[in-house]
Image (tube, rainbow, N blue to C red):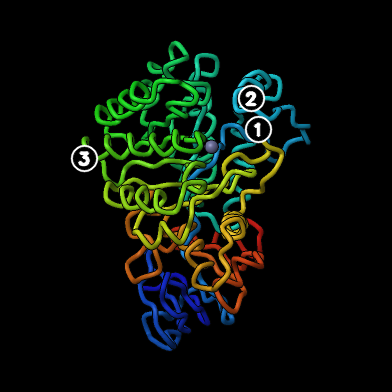
């Protein structure tokens, strides 16, 4: 028996033309996709929503954010972070107690905004250091519990203040993994910890012991950053972790010579190592077309939002896809759709989501937008007309349903 019938839809699958279709949802999954489903007896009695020709996208995936840091929905806080990585790290740690972060309330505020904008899945890094301990894990878990059924949240135990250079952090990361956090994070193994082999060996060792995935923040630029990609690729192959390792930010990638870029992208594709780009500041974005050409996985995230690092951001993943496409100078419709694919299917691959998409049998996590083409949706960032998670309507016209 069908629970929800979306009529007048145009479902989008990357690389395929849009065709008008109705979408039937039953038991939280997509039960049928095709023309004129409304008349069929099995769909009688369902909640019917006429989408009037709107494009339907699979639920957006924010593959990189920092829910524990945010002050979203709180009072405006002038930014005092300064311009260096080290300075922003120290500012972030020094003022969080005064400002009440990590906060389950602020994290829940941000998750609500994300859901209203069509995000169904989130990967959030959580600062782990001797002062804050695992408080961020607890706060974000509480926030995610409040939004249960509306969005799924995956946590990364993230050594924001350094790993090897910060006594006590390796033990705290291990405690987080023992406590059920599923991803272990790293931070500039060379540029910050100044011991790339040491940090990466520790991360891969922890991941193997706890069956965790790996997601390394890598701001290091130029040949230093590129060399660290190679170290990560080598270890991923050696440990059989294909599909479970990601490099976040990867600022070096966009600045390399074209032939070097291609060699790295081929190596990433071969080893099953993903990159996650956020279009932050002036740093180069990961080249979207090259990643698609080589088959290397690419995902997109919002990174920090209204926190002690940045006053910017609103949690809207479609807007972030727009920023990545703009920064990467994607101009033709097929190119712009590559960025949209990174913000949807690419993120799903990085998070390891099963049954993701708009095919029959997939989980019914989707959103509808008024646009003539997917590229127009990316460029114009329209209000999300409808958001469905697990087969239930969770937002209408940009507003969360109760
Ligand atoms: Zn980050």
> Whole-percent x and y of residue 168?
43, 12
Based on the displayed image, in which of its 4 quarters is residue 296 positioned? bottom left
Which residue sits at x=54%, y=74%?
55
Residue 309, labelled with which disc? 1
Q: CA distance from mark 3 to mark 2?
A: 36 Å
Q: Earlier in the sequence, mark 3 or mark 2?
A: 2
Disc 2: residue Cβ within 8 A of ligand 1's nearest atom: no
Disc 1: residue Cβ within 8 A of ligand 1's nearest atom: no
Q: CA distance from mark 2 to mark 1?
A: 7 Å
In this rendering, would 309 be left or right of 33? Answer: right
Look at the numbered disc 1 and give the secondary structure of its residue: loop
Residue pointed to by mark 3: 240
Residue pointed to by mark 2: 92
Q: Earlier in the sequence, mark 2 or mark 1?
A: 2
Nearest to the observer: residue 236 or residue 109: 236
Q: CA distance from mark 1 to mark 3?
A: 35 Å
Which residue sits at x=67%, y=35%?
71
> Whole-percent x and y of residue 272?
30, 48
In this rendering, would 323 be left or right of 294? Answer: right
Q: Quadrant of the N terminus?
A: bottom left
Pointer 2 local density, CA inside 10 Å: few below 14, some 14–19, many at least 20: many
**Mark 2 and mark 3 in contact (Cβ < 8 Å)?**
no
Based on the displayed image, in which of its 4 quarters is residue 156 positioned? top left
**Mark 3 and mark 1 in contact (Cβ < 8 Å)?**
no
Which residue sits at x=27%, y=50%?
270
Pointer 1 local density, CA inside 10 Å: few below 14, some 14–19, many at least 20: many
Look at the numbered disc 3 and give the secondary structure of its residue: loop
């Amino acid at each position: 028996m069908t629970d929800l019938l979306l009529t007048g839809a145009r479902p989008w699958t990357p690389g395929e033309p849009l065709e008008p279709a109705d979408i039937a949802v039953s038991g939280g999954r997509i039960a049928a996709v095709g023309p004129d489903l409304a008349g069929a007896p099995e769909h009688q009695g369902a909640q019917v929503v006429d989408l009037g020709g709107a494009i339907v996208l699979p639920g957006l995936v924010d593959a990189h954010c920092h829910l524990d840091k945010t002050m979203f929905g709180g009072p405006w806080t002038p930014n005092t972070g300064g311009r260096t990585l080290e300075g922003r790290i120290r500012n972030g740690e020094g003022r969080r107690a005064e400002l009440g972060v990590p906060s389950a309330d602020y994290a829940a505020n941000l998750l609500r905004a994300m859901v209203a904008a069509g995000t169904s899945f989130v990967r959030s890094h959580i600062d782990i250091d001797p002062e804050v301990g695992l408080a961020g894990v607890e706060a974000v878990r509480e926030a995610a519990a409040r939004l249960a059924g509306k969005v799924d949240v995956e946590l990364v135990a993230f050594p924001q203040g350094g790993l090897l250079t910060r006594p006590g952090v390796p033990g705290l990361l291990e405690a987080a993994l023992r406590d059920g956090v599923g991803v272990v994070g790293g931070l500039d193994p060379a540029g910050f910890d100044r011991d790339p082999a040491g940090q990466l060996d520790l991360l891969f060792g922890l991941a193997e012991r706890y069956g965790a995935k790996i997601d390394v923040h890598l701001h290091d630029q130029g040949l230093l950053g590129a060399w660290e990609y190679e170290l990560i690729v080598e270890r991923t192959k050696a440990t059989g972790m294909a599909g479970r390792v990601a490099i976040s930010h990867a600022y070096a990638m966009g600045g390399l010579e074209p032939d070097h870029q291609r060699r790295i992208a081929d190596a990433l594709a071969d080893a099953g190592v993903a990159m996650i780009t956020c279009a932050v500041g002036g740093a180069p974005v990961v080249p979207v077309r090259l990643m698609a050409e080589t088959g290397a996985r690419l995902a997109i995230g919002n990174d920090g939002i209204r926190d002690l690092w940045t006053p910017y951001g609103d949690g809207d993943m479609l807007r972030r896809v727009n920023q990545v496409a703009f920064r990467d100078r994607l101009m033709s419709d097929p190119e712009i759709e590559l960025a949209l694919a990174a913000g949807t299917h690419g993120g799903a691959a990085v998070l390891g989501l099963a049954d993701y998409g708009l095919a029959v049998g997939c989980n019914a996590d989707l959103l509808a937008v008024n646009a003539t083409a997917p590229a127009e949706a990316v460029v114009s960032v329209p209000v999300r007309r409808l958001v469905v998670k697990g087969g239930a309507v969770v937002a209408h016209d940009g507003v969360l349903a109760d």
